[in-house]
Image: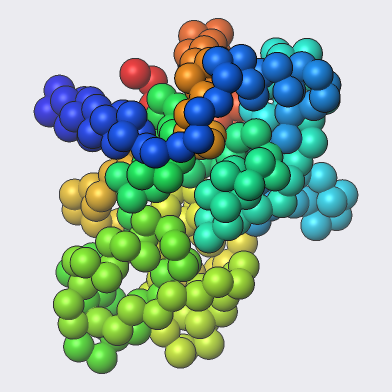
Amino acid sequence: MATRSLWAVSFSILSVLSVGIVAPAVAADGRLQKIAEQKQLRVCSWPDYYAISFRNPRTGALEGLDAELAQEFAKDLGVRLTVVESSFPRFIEDLLAERCDIGMFAIGATPARAQQVAFSQPYLRSGIYAVTTQTNGGIQRWEDLDRTGNVVVVQKDTYMDGYARSAMKAARIVAVTRPQEREEEVQSGRADAFLTDYPYGQRMLAFHPWARLIVPDLPVQPTPYAYAVAPGDTAWLDRVNAFVAAIKADGRLESIAARYKLTPIVARD
């Protein structure tokens, strides 16, 4: 019950921040009208997010929870889906520049991001995990990460980046930008561990025998994952929230999440 209350408070804070966003006035039916007129939903997606939106190397097709839910949303709207390749460092710029209508790739709804974009109700929640090597005897528990001499890698502009810089005082924090650069740094020995979330941690265990997952005894900075839209269009945000409510109620969220082994982080409230 305490955890649920904490999440309720956290999301209330995000909602207040979103209300305070300064943005150009948008007609009440602005985005929805454009989507209907153009007969397409443009979804910003990061194509290297395991179990969320990742490109199958054999087929080139996007797979994962949000890859499928983007298709479902376009179907619900009665339009075609157009995927716009984006990333965590770039999605806010893409939304504000109207290169896409919505970001759908398990975006952490942090207060800092909520100052620039508007978030839907959450549909996933994940804490932070660490990945090290099977042979790194110096890191056995979460508390071993923040030691003098350790190098901890984070993906630039993710909420793990912010967490590491505020919470870790002894280890050296290195932010990287390229896909797979975090694991390359750790596997090569240039870094001791990298921080990630539940889906990417599962990717490491599934595909990299050298990897070992460090799970904290207590959840570390559990964060709601939501869909992001440009601020100022209440009707569009309401329609996105209606979609989130629908996939929770009709079982689509649960069933697709189960196929990608994401059931432990499904947000059911």
Query: Residue 49 location in percent, x, y?
Result: 60, 52
Residue 143 appearing in the image: yes
| Residue 265, quarter of the rendered image | top left
Query: Residue 20 location in percent, x, y?
Result: 31, 34
Residue at 34%, 84% in the rendered image: 151
| Residue 145, quarter of the rendered image | bottom left
Q: Is residue 209 above or below residue 95?
A: below
Residue 11 appearing in the image: no
Residue at 19%, 49% in the rendered image: 218
Q: Nearer the viewer, residue 267 or 86?
A: 86
Q: Is residue 159 above or below residue 210?
A: above
Specify the quadrant that holds the N terminus: top left
In the picture provided, is 115 more to the left or to the right than 237? left
Residue at 70%, 44% in the rendered image: 99
In the picture provided, is 55 more to the left or to the right than 181? right
Query: Residue 87 location in percent, x, y?
Result: 60, 56
Q: Is residue 260 above or below residue 59?
A: above
In the picture provided, is 158 more to the left or to the right than 246? left
